[in-house]
Amino acid sequence: MSFIKNKEDFNCENCSSKNRGNGYTNHCSECLYSIHVDIDPGDRLNSCGGLMEPIYVSYTNNNKYLVHKCLKCSFEKRNILNVNDSVEKMIQIQKKLSN
């Protein structure tokens, strides 16, 4: 698996927020949703195109990861959280898990 850096700005398909890409951005910084477009990170070769819901936050080796689940095909993928991601949304996701 090799990473392909793609610096892309995008409007979120879930909440319509405008997002500035930095080459590593793969989800909306506001609602934390993503789109299932990659087979390997950055390649844009997956034809699924399903909306990916953030389902939980995990912590490993001092990094925070956001786990997404595709609402179309059920594929799950872990991604590093960005410093500008919504802390409020992260907390909501964690609270949802504990209910």
Image: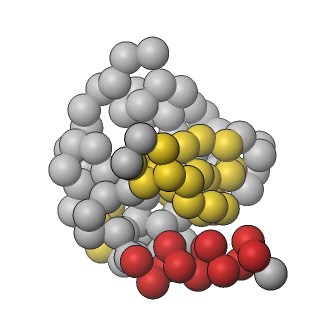
Taking 24 as reference, is 3 above or below it? above
Q: Is residue 45 visible?
A: no
Percent position of residue 32, x then y: 48, 67
- Quarter-of-image position of residue 81: bottom left
Q: Residue at x 54, y 43 (%)?
A: 78
Q: Residue at x 22, y 43 (%)?
A: 23
Percent position of residue 54, x then y: 59, 62
Front residue of 53/13: it is 53
Front residue of 49/78: it is 78
Left or right of 26? Residue 38 is right
Q: Residue at x 50, y 52 (%)?
A: 59
Percent position of residue 8, x then y: 25, 49
Left or right of 3? Residue 88 is right
Residue furthest to the front: 61
Q: Is residue 56 visible?
A: yes
Taking 79 as reference, is 41 above or below it? above
Percent position of residue 39, x then y: 53, 27
Left or right of 75? Residue 32 is left
